[in-house]
Amino acid sequence: MIVVVDGISASGKTTWCAKHGGQHVVPENGRFKDEPNRLQDPVGAAAFWAERNVDRWQAALATEEMSSWALCDSDPLKLHYIWSLWQIGEASEHDWRLELAATRETVAQRRIGFADYYIVGSIDPQLARERANADTTRRRRKFELHVRLQTALLNWYSAIEKVLPGRVQFGFPSEMPALKSLDGRYALEAFDQMIASLPRPHTA
């Protein structure tokens, strides 16, 4: 069973994972020295991030195989990030389409898929800022950008819930829910339906 915990920076997802996941936690990716520049090489950037997502999914599968379940600190299938950037005008539709195509191919190849369950937190932006400022143990790059992404992030997971009902819980529960593995991990049709249901950016 693979469980994803997601939310913007300072929402509490990493703390929740540490409390409830222990050795089952699959951490977020750190920074990469060889990240392609999306402006200079959009095709290369799309392929790069699709493969980094696959790497995390494979880590989740390995954890699941060893101990029956894995708890991912943010979704390995992190396609929501470029989509959310497009929603707020920080990435182009072309960037989104390139990464969508690269990611869809990895889903079709069954190299990445849907988690069995998603726990998605939201937080008042001002509280998130206060938490971030009080946390001296972490540098939160692009924090204000992440605050702006929250609405799009919630819309993304709402789209997953519409296509795969019962798989998404909004709000961090006090305890790990009783869960089981579900069918449809690599359902390309569900992936396509979810993508088709996503809203387009609001234009002035």
Image (spheres, rainbow, N blue to C red):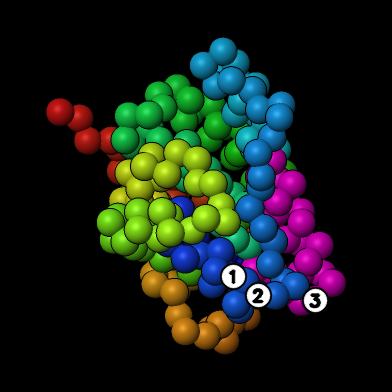
In the image, what residue type sits under mark 2? Gly
SS at mark 3 in the image: helix
Q: Nearer the viewer, residue 142 or 198?
A: 142
Q: Is residue 146 left or right of residue 73?
A: left
Residue 36: quadrant of the picture: top right
Residue 4 in the image: state x and y as whole percent: 57, 64
Q: Which residues are magenta?
A: 52-71
Classify mark 2: residues with Cα within 10 Å, few (<14), some (14-19) or many (20+): some
Q: Is residue 33 above or below residue 144?
A: above
Q: Residue at x 78, y 66 (%)?
A: 63
Q: Is residue 108 left or right of residue 140?
A: right
* Quarter in which the N terminus is drawn: bottom right
Residue under label 1, please give it: 17
Q: Earlier in the sequence, mark 1 or mark 3?
A: 1
Asked whether the beta carbons under mark 1 and mark 3 sit within 8 Å of each other, the answer is: no
Residue under label 2, please give it: 21
* Quarter in which the C terminus is drawn: top left
Closer to the eye: label 1 or 3:
1
